[in-house]
């Protein structure tokens, strides 16, 4: 009787809540990873500079290509034309396959997260292997989780409902950043290591429990009814009209105009998101350090991880009412307007600067979260245009990542080059004499000379406002060419529904 009540309560949770909880079990790990993995290997494990950059270079290549690789391995069977006859794998079975993959890869992600915090190999080798293992399992989890968003629901209302719970649970997961401050200690690493073990255990067990609940929900679609509808049941694995090679698939994408305009816009968005993340501490230091305390700066940094998810809880209902296209366009216009206002106001208003730096990061990160919904619409259009037997959701998400992830690399490279070009201050400048046997893998960059400080402050200000102005103008242009909204979007969804019903044995609802 003691276990019956919790099991009954868990069984009564809405499907959208169970789906959204998967974001919690990823976020509690990933935010801690982003904050501490570099500092751990540099300050605790004393990795040398060459090993660090070799590991980061290999990681950059692996991070760029594993998304389409795993997407192709997952969805290559769905690329052929629709089958003529026979029975085979249904849409429900595709969803179950993705849920089963999450049940395996989620706990493996938690184990690979643990591998960072326990020294088990030479620092350079451990750094390389840990990065590649962790990013591989993170990619698998993200691809299948995002693909489920397109597979579980077809309507815009259903997808925004699922995304609402993702944002809610992601905000809760971001609180692990605040909790980590209480345990982080470079000199005594045991308490932080125990904290990471607790996070990994909670995440792994959460993935197992959530995927089991989700699997039971999907399997019970014949009996139950609820708020979310599964996509209609398609026949997959029957007699095929023709198989598609990778080259043919890439040529199909090259003819997909909305896909091309979207990845162009999203490349700029990814660049801007990582530019804000990379230079957020620099802007606080050189523009606001004389006006705010160190603890206030740390609070702004921490809240910037949580606020975008909370922000989306407001924007997602607007997406249901006005459409994702209109909301994203309004956010681009807001970014442009705030940046122009800040440019006219100048750097001598610390209150405005504080609000602008925080809001710029929050709105930019929030826009990234909304764009997942646009990719699900592109999945629908890809299926309709190419008459696929099943939506290749994971593969399309992987191809979007392949094109847009270089923005992560361009952000720090272009930002540091612009800062050096306009101010002469090199963030990577080293002293002429390096102590032999120093415990630091590379020295800290020297502070700017007093005469250079005003120029550096002015350069940081113009970098802060001109980058979002340029990004907003580029995005407004590319977004104006994107036509998958309004009447066309309704037409695509109706055609997908009709194509599915033409091969449906029976349509079930959850």
Image (spheres, rainbow, N blue to C red):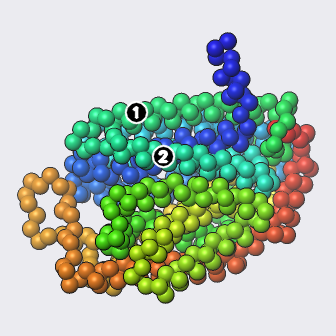
- In which image quadrant can residue 410 be found? bottom left
- Frontmost of labels 1 and 2 is 2
Q: Quadrant of residue 179?
A: top left
For the question of whether residue 382 can be seen, the reply is: no
Q: Please identify the quadrant where the N terminus is shown.
A: top right
Depth check: give the residue in front, 234 or 224: 224
User: At x 61% / y 37%, what residue is drawn?
Assistant: 101
Counting from the top left corner in percent of width and height, residue 479 is at 67, 75
Give the residue number, with chain letter if any, for mark 1: 197
17 or 117: nearer the eye?
Answer: 17
Residue in the foreground of this view, choosing between 339 and 202: 339
Around disc 1, counting alpha carbons within 10 Å, would you say few (fewer than 14), some (14 to 19), or many (20 or more)?
some
- Left or right of residue 406: residue 53: left
In the image as oriented, which residue stretches furthest toward the bottom?
Answer: 344
Q: Are marks 1 and 2 in contact (CB under 8 Å)?
A: no
| Percent of width and height locating residue 421 | 32, 84
Given residues 79 and 141, the one toward you in this image is: 141
In the displayed structure, does residue 169 sit left or right of residue 220? left
Q: Which mark is residue 66?
A: none
Pointer 2: what residue?
175
């Amino acid at each position: 009787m003691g276990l019956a009540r919790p099991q009954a309560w868990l069984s009564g949770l809405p499907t959208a809540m169970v789906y959204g909880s998967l974001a919690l079990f990823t976020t509690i790990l990933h935010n801690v990873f982003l904050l501490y993995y570099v500092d751990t290997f540099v300050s605790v494990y004393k990795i040398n500079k060459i090993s660090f950059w070799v590991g980061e270079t290999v990681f950059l290549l692996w991070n760029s290509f594993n998304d389409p690789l795993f997407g192709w391995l997952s969805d290559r069977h769905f690329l052929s034309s629709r089958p003529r006859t026979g029975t085979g794998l249904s849409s429900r079975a595709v969803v179950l396959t993705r849920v089963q993959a999450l049940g395996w890869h989620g706990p493996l992600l938690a184990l690979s997260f643990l591998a960072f915090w326990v020294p088990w190999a030479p620092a350079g080798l451990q750094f390389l292997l840990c990065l590649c293992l962790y990013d591989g399992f993170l990619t698998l989890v993200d691809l299948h989780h995002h693909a489920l968003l397109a597979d579980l629901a077809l309507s815009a209302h259903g997808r925004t409902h699922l995304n609402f719970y993702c944002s809610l649970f992601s905000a809760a997961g971001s609180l692990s950043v605040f909790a980590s401050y209480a345990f982080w200690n470079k000199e005594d690493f045991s308490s932080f290591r125990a904290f990471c073990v607790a996070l990994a255990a909670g995440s792994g067990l959460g993935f197992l429990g959530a995927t089991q609940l989700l699997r039971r929900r999907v399997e019970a679609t014949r009996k139950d009814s609820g708020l979310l509808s599964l996509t209609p049941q398609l026949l997959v694995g029957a007699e095929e009209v023709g198989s598609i090679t990778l080259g043919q698939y890439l040529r199909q994408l090259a003819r997909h105009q909305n896909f091309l305009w979207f990845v162009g816009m999203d490349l700029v968005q990814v660049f801007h998101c990582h530019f804000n993340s990379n230079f957020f501490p620099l802007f606080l230091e050189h523009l606001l350090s004389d006006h705010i305390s160190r603890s206030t700066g740390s609070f702004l940094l921490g809240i910037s991880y949580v606020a975008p998810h909370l922000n989306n809880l407001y924007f997602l209902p607007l997406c249901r009412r006005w459409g994702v296209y209109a909301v994203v366009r309004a956010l681009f216009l807001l970014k442009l307007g705030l940046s122009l206002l800040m440019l006219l106001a100048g750097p001598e208003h610390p209150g405005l600067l504080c609000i602008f730096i925080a809001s710029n990061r929050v709105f930019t990160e929030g826009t990234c979260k909304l764009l997942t919904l646009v990719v699900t619409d592109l999945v629908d259009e890809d299926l309709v245009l190419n008459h696929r037997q099943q939506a290749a959701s994971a593969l399309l998400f992987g191809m979007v990542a392949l094109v847009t992830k270089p923005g992560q690399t361009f952000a720090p490279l272009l930002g540091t080059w612009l800062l050096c070009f306009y101010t002469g201050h090199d963030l990577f400048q080293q002293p002429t004499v390096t102590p032999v046997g120093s415990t630091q893998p590379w020295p800290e960059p020297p502070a700017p000379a007093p005469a250079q400080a005003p120029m550096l402050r002015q350069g940081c200000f113009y970098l802060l406002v001109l980058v979002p102005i340029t990004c907003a103008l580029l995005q407004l242009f590319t977004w104006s060419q994107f036509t998958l909204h309004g009447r066309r979007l309704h037409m695509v969804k109706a055609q997908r529904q009709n194509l599915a019903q033409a091969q449906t044995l029976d349509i079930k609802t959850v």
